[in-house]
Image (tube, helix red, strand yellow):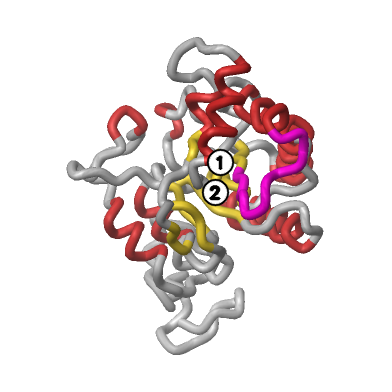
Amino acid sequence: METRMLGRLWPVSALTLGGGGVGQLWGPTTRDECIATVRTAVDCGITLLDMAPAYGNGEAESVVGAAFDGRLPAGIRVTTKHRLGTPPAGEVEGNIVRSLDESLARMRLERVDLFFLHSNIIPDDYDAGAYVDRPATRWTIYIEHFIPTCERLVADGRIGAWGITGIGIPECVLAALSESSRPAAVQCITNPLDSPGELKYFAGPSRAREIIAASKKGGRRCARHPPGTGWSAYRCARPGFAAGSWCRHGLQT
């Protein structure tokens, strides 16, 4: 099996086993068949298992737990996700930690290698009416609460790194990749048509190629000024701050 570096994290197999099938999202199967699928994938050289609570209401994670009973083979990496949405600010950390606890219990693990935000990021003032079946996370919640919570989880050793789902509004994904605290990985859909298909909840192109290019670069923006306020890389465009000055959040404009 060919291996490739996953960003700056670690080498993984070029093919990943996604959790949708073993979570029975694509049609009914049996738990035994799903366990056999996971074990066979690992035996054939796949080293990254991409899970989420949303894959069969925890079924995919339970399959991983049953397949290895908490003792992953050497070199196997596991991801999981959380569909945070936009809860009240004071509830975000507890919401995230509770979801992670439940995922770890199902997989019989003490940590995961990569933890993704499974809801799309949208501007604070964006009409979220299209996000009926996939609750969206507003920018301020992402910046001020999701990121700090994930960084504490990394420090505590409960997750190895954190990432985001990159099928949301392209401007928000690109903005997230320009922050000083940027995701270690972005899951985005790219194909010859550069289209996320039925997962598209926004107008305009998906800009997947731009997102992939941006994920390979660094950058810094003022985290307090969300998409739509007119700032650009290395520029805090809040009214009253001239180019070359420092904004109140400590980034030079």
- Magenta-span inclusion, residue 182: no
Q: Which residue lies at the image location 27% right of the left edge and 56% below the top edge?
A: 209
Residue 6 x, y percent position in the rendering:
48, 60
- In the figure, residue 149 lies in which quadrant? bottom right
Give the number of the disc on residue 25: none
Does 134 sit above or below residue 240? above
Residue 86 x, y percent position in the rendering:
60, 38
Q: Secondary structure under badge 2?
A: loop
Residue 134 in the figure: left or right of residue 103: left
Residue under pointer 2 = 47
Question: How many marks overall?
Answer: 2
User: Are the residues at dot 1 and dot 2 in contact (C-beta closer than 8 Å)?
Assistant: yes
Q: Residue at the bottom extreme? A: 244
Residue under pointer 1 = 42
Residue 76 in the figure: left or right of residue 176: right
Mark 2 crowd level (few <14, some 14–19, many ≥20, 10 Å Cα): many
